[in-house]
Image (cartoon, rainbow, N blue to C red):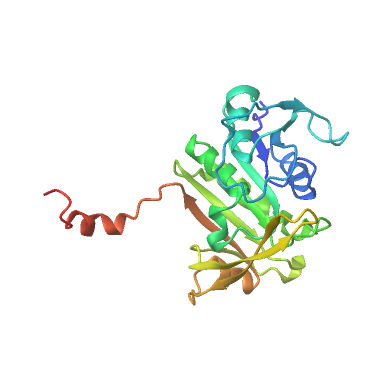
Amino acid sequence: MEQEKPLILVTNDDGITAPGIRALIKLMTTIGEVYVVAPDSPQSGMGHAITVNNTLYCDKVVIEKDAPQQEYSCSGTPVDCVKLATREILPKKPDLCVSGINHGSNSAINVIYSGTMSAAVEAGIEGIPAIGFSLLDYAMDANFVPGESFIKKIVENVLQNGLPKGVVLNVNIPKLKKDEIKGIKICRQANAHWFEEFDKRTNPMGREYYWLSGKFINEDKGEDTDEWALKNGFISVVPTHFDLTAHHFIQELNNWSLHD
């Protein structure tokens, strides 16, 4: 008897027509039965935002003739897409949720701003094994082929081994040729941040406006971080979860005079 294919939900934050998600969809159809629920427009930097004060629309679409017929374009955020998919669209709970392939890095501190990773984290909250994939190339004509065999290997391992509830994988792929990628490195998130600035300007009507800019600063010298791995030719894999509790500080906080 032929084994039933795993049900895979594909989403992203760059929009349903972005080259990254189209590449991921094509790859996932070689592994399982694919449903796509993704934003109808770019939602980068949305983090874990959800739509609460506006209506949501989710329309069945055909983006490519040879693509899966179960594709839906959603007016909401990446997290909205996962919520709608699991509650309204999919025939059952998916075996896996993959988000991406994002155009640009989601390593280090970027993970908390990322719509790509927030979609994966939302799936993790719902007990669905999930992976966020990102390529360190912002160009719309980015080449996703060098990372495809590694993506497939990671997906197949997650399907085989599972993930602890609430834990998702944050996978970043360096912008390299296939023979230049040294392999996969399991990492921790680097202690890095953005030094942000605002470029203040005035529009033709005299109203002031701002462009956010900044410089990425990595103060972490460890060789076990995602930043080190990416700079040294490895694909970084960071196990990530949504529990933001600073467990190491609980005992000290209990020693404060808060209970008097």
Asked whether, in this view, residue 257 is left or right of residue 175, the answer is: left
Asked whether, in this view, residue 145 is left or right of residue 107, the answer is: right
Q: Is residue 186 above or below residue 60?
A: below
Q: Nearer the viewer, residue 61 or 175?
A: 61
Q: Nearer the viewer, residue 114 or 131?
A: 114
Asked whether, in this view, residue 77 is left or right of residue 176, the answer is: left
| Res 34 seen here | no
Q: Please report the residue visible at 61 percent of the width from the left and 58 percent of the height from the top.
A: 106
Which residue, as the protein is rendered here, is positioned at the far bottom? Answer: 221
Query: At which x and y percent is residue 172?
Result: 63, 59
Q: Nearer the viewer, residue 235 or 45?
A: 45
Q: Is residue 191 above or below residue 42?
A: below
Q: Dividing the image into 4 quarters, which one contains the N terminus?
A: top right
Query: At which x and y percent is residue 211?
Result: 68, 60
| Res 82 seen here | yes
Q: Is residue 210 above or below residue 91?
A: below
Residue 199 quadrant: bottom right
Which residue, as the protein is rendered here, is positioned at the far right? Answer: 65
Residue 248 quadrant: bottom left
Q: Is residue 68 above or below residue 210?
A: above
Which residue, as the protein is rendered here, is positioned at the far left? Answer: 260
Query: At which x and y percent is residue 132?
Result: 61, 49
Q: Please report the residue visible at 48 percent of the width from the left and 38 percent of the height from the top.
A: 125
Query: At which x and y percent is residue 256?
Result: 18, 57
